[in-house]
């Protein structure tokens, strides 16, 4: 029976603040604020009269919706609460970089010797899937095929032939064959699945016996090992706010806290679970943690509005101004190196039983 590889050891964070001059890395990419200033716009594609059903379906998935100056997916409109515009895509790529650094360049901690069919669920920009088909394991196993599935067709059009993207709703019935995948990868999908046990059972059905699921999440619970993050702070309130949003939309946000138990309940075996502390900001003394914290902060500053604006307003009924005030409070805390907060990163690998695991 193969075992997943261990991630880098979870390090103790030295809460001693660093110099306030410590700065985060820059990405070299400027944020595009123009779409914030854009009034809500309905985007309509010009479709020729002789359009076929397929073309019309294809076009409709690009018929993006605009709200709060942000662009949202069109297929199964309203299903997912974060925008799919450039600004949010950059946030996703930033957090991908953070995951990459934390996992020391590894794409997965699951055994990757015999991968043939891989599914990346809610693949977003497609960055994980693309890196997967360009990685060592694809070089060594040219037969590997990675499918990325998402509500948004935001992945690049030109990708290696063994990488394929599909627009679909992962919460609907899967048309993939049963006992097919060698690895199903799930990352940053908190608030996207109504019933995780049912979802994991579906993954189980489509995995080959002995194959692996990997689920990676960032927790929404801001933690602090000293008294620099007061109880009423915006970061402390974050998880309560998202608990309410999760209840309102029927998709919980606490999966980083519950995934281990739910994966076992769904019937997976050989469950390995790791929790790493990811600082928010550059306050740790340790160089590596400072780097993780810098990427985490960059990601939060870039992504916060997208992650929250629809939930705060549509789901909780806050006014746009109230929501922006709360976000401003959060940003202020996130950039304050006097606050020694961190969140957990959860990595779970688990296996579908076969004769070797019995
Ligand atoms: C936070 S992003 C994570 C993207 C990617 N997993 C990553 O780690 O880079 C969540 C993604 O899930 C997708 N998503 C949410 N609900 C979905 C659903 N029901 N079916 C398919 N994709 C979904 C969103 O469109 C979005 O791209």
Image (spheres, rainbow, N blue to C red):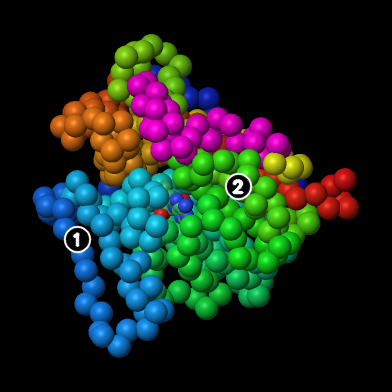
Measured along the vertical axis of the image, is residue 185 above or below residue 136? above
Q: Position of residue 301 (x, y in %)?
A: 28, 39
Q: Secondary structure at mark 1?
A: loop
Alpha carbon of mark 1 to alpha carbon of mark 2: how far?
33 Å
Residue at coordinates 16% horizontally, 53% vertically from top-left? Answer: 40
Task: Name the side, left or right, on which 268 lies relative to 324.
Answer: right
Q: Which residue is mark 2?
A: 199
Residue at coordinates 31% horizontally, 31% vertically from top-left? Answer: 316
Of the numbered discs 1 and 2, the one sitting upstream in the chain is 1
Label 2 crowding class (10 Å Cα cut-off): few <14, some 14-19, many 20+?
A: some
Of 63 and 126, the residue lying toward us: 63
Q: Which residue is mark 1?
A: 42
The magenta-colored residue range is 236-265
Label 1 crowding class (10 Å Cα cut-off): few <14, some 14-19, many 20+?
A: few
Residue at coordinates 65% horizontally, 57% vertically from top-left? Answer: 183
**How many numbered circles are shown?**
2
Quadrant of the image occupied by residue 268:
top right
């Amino acid at each position: 029976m193969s075992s997943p590889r261990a991630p880098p050891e979870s390090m103790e964070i030295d809460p001693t603040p660093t110099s306030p001059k410590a700065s985060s890395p820059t990405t070299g990419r400027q944020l595009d604020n123009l779409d914030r200033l854009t009034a809500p716009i309905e985007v309509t594609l010009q479709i020729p009269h002789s359009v076929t059903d397929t073309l019309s379906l294809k076009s409709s998935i690009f018929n993006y919706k605009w709200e709060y100056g942000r662009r949202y997916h069109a297929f199964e409109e309203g299903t997912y609460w974060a925008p799919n515009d450039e600004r949010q895509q950059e946030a996703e790529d930033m957090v991908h970089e953070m995951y990459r650094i934390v996992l020391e360049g590894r794409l997965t901690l699951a055994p990757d010797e015999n991968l043939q069919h891989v599914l990346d669920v809610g693949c977003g920009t497609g960055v994980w899937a693309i890196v997967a088909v360009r990685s060592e394991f694809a070089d060594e196993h040219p037969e590997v095929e990675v499918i990325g599935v998402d509500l948004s067709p935001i992945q690049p059009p030109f990708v290696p032939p063994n990488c394929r993207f599909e627009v679909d709703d992962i919460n609907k019935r899967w048309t993939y064959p049963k006992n097919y995948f060698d690895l199903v990868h799930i990352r940053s999908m908190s608030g996207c699945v109504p019933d995780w046990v049912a979802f994991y059972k579906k993954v189980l059905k489509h995995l080959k016996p002995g194959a692996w699921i990997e689920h990676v999440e960032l927790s929404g619970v801001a933690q602090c090992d000293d008294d620099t993050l007061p109880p009423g702070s915006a970061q402390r309130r974050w998880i309560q706010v998202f608990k309410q949003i999760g209840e309102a939309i029927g998709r919980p946000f606490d999966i980083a806290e519950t995934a281990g138990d739910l994966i076992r309940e769904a019937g997976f075996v050989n469950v390995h679970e790791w929790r790493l502390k990811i600082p928010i900001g550059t306050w740790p003394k340790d160089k590596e943690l400072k780097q993780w914290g810098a990427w985490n902060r960059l990601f939060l500053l870039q992504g916060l509005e997208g992650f929250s604006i629809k939930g705060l307003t549509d789901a909780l009924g806050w006014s746009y101004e109230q929501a922006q005030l709360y976000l401003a409070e959060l940003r202020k805390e996130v950039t304050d190196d006097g606050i020694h907060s961190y969140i957990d990163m959860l990595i779970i690998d688990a296996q579908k039983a076969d004769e070797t695991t019995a």
